[in-house]
Image: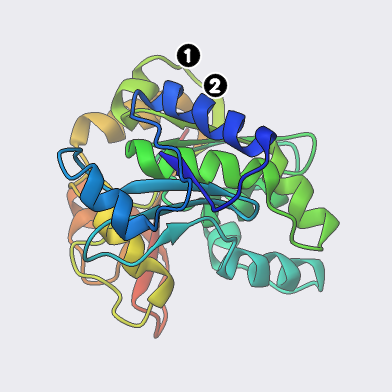
Amino acid sequence: MTTAEKPDPALAAYARGLAVELGCRFAERRRETLAGLARKYKDAAGGILVAGPQGLRYRADGAEPLFYHPSMAQIRVKRLLEGGGDALIEASGVRSGDVVVDCTAGLGADALVLSFAAGDGGSVTAIEASRILYMIVREGLKAYESGMPELDEAMRRVNVRHGEHLQALRGMQDRSADIVYFDPMFAKPVLGSASLRPLRVHAEDRSLAAEAIAEARRVARRAVVLKDHKTSGEFERHGFRRVRTSYSAVDYGVIGIQ
């Protein structure tokens, strides 16, 4: 953990606090380049998390920098504000006041759109297994300024949690959420999605467990929703009914709760 060059005392204190939370080493930046710090601390596992005025940025050898940005979520929310539709919102049926659990937060784009749709009377809990992703998204959602008040308010409402979604679901009460949502990292990547390339290096990449689906069905009041590659066998394997297919590489499936 380090800072951008010439940090003010507040930024340095913030970075030190994150280092303590993460249980990692804090390195004074001084006049060092990031490459110089990497050489100096070559015994340390992983990369370098940099705290700067624009937020957190994670750098690791051979990987693109990872940082928070609402990306396509900003365009999707703008479209909703203008009266347009959104595939996830239509497939899931999320509406104002809903309680939603996003079990696979990633960079938080879907959680942000869900938060906008649920409104200030609803809530979205986004669970992320990767500690680096969790930290970057948590801090980004708290501080990012998009220039769109409705989007920024939706960001602040997302509650990001670090952990495995199965364990998190086990700790939730029966029928405590309206929608439980899964967007696992596709085994077959969508090659046209440049925004997801840095994410694939850090995200937990594993198939959904049948037990996770069973726990989601217990927790959900209305529906369990899955987003996956259209050629994936996960929909059929777990009993999801495909509710949206298109020329896109992505399909959505739903298990309705009676």
Residue at the extreme front of the image, as rendered: 31
Residue at x-position 39% and y-position 27%: 22
* In-front residue for pair 90/76: 76
Q: CA distance from mark 2 to mark 1?
A: 5 Å
* In-front residue for pair 170/126: 126
* In-front residue for pair 81/1: 1
The image position of residue 97, as x and y in percent, is 74, 36
Q: Is residue 85 above or below residue 8?
A: below
The image position of residue 47, as x and y in percent, is 28, 48
The image position of residue 48, as x and y in percent, is 35, 47
Judged left or right of residue 29, residue 155 is right
Q: Is residue 168 above or below residue 209?
A: above
Residue at x-position 39% and y-position 77%: 194
What amino acid is at disc 1?
Answer: Gln
How many residues crowd around disc 2 within 10 Å: few (fewer than 14), some, or many (20 or more)? some
How many residues crowd around disc 1 within 10 Å: few (fewer than 14), some, or many (20 or more)? few
The image position of residue 196, as x and y in percent, is 37, 67
Residue at x-position 63% and y-position 38%: 11
Q: Is residue 62 visible?
A: yes
Judged left or right of residue 238, residue 241 is right
Label 2 SS: loop
Q: Which residue is mark 2?
A: 176
Residue at the extreme right of the image, as rendered: 149
Mark 1 and mark 2 in contact (Cβ < 8 Å)?
A: yes
What amino acid is at disc 2?
Answer: Ser
Label 1 SS: loop
Q: Quadrant of the N terminus?
A: top left
Q: Which residue is mark 1?
A: 173
Check the image and tell me how it is coloured: rainbow
Q: Is residue 62 above or below residue 167?
A: below
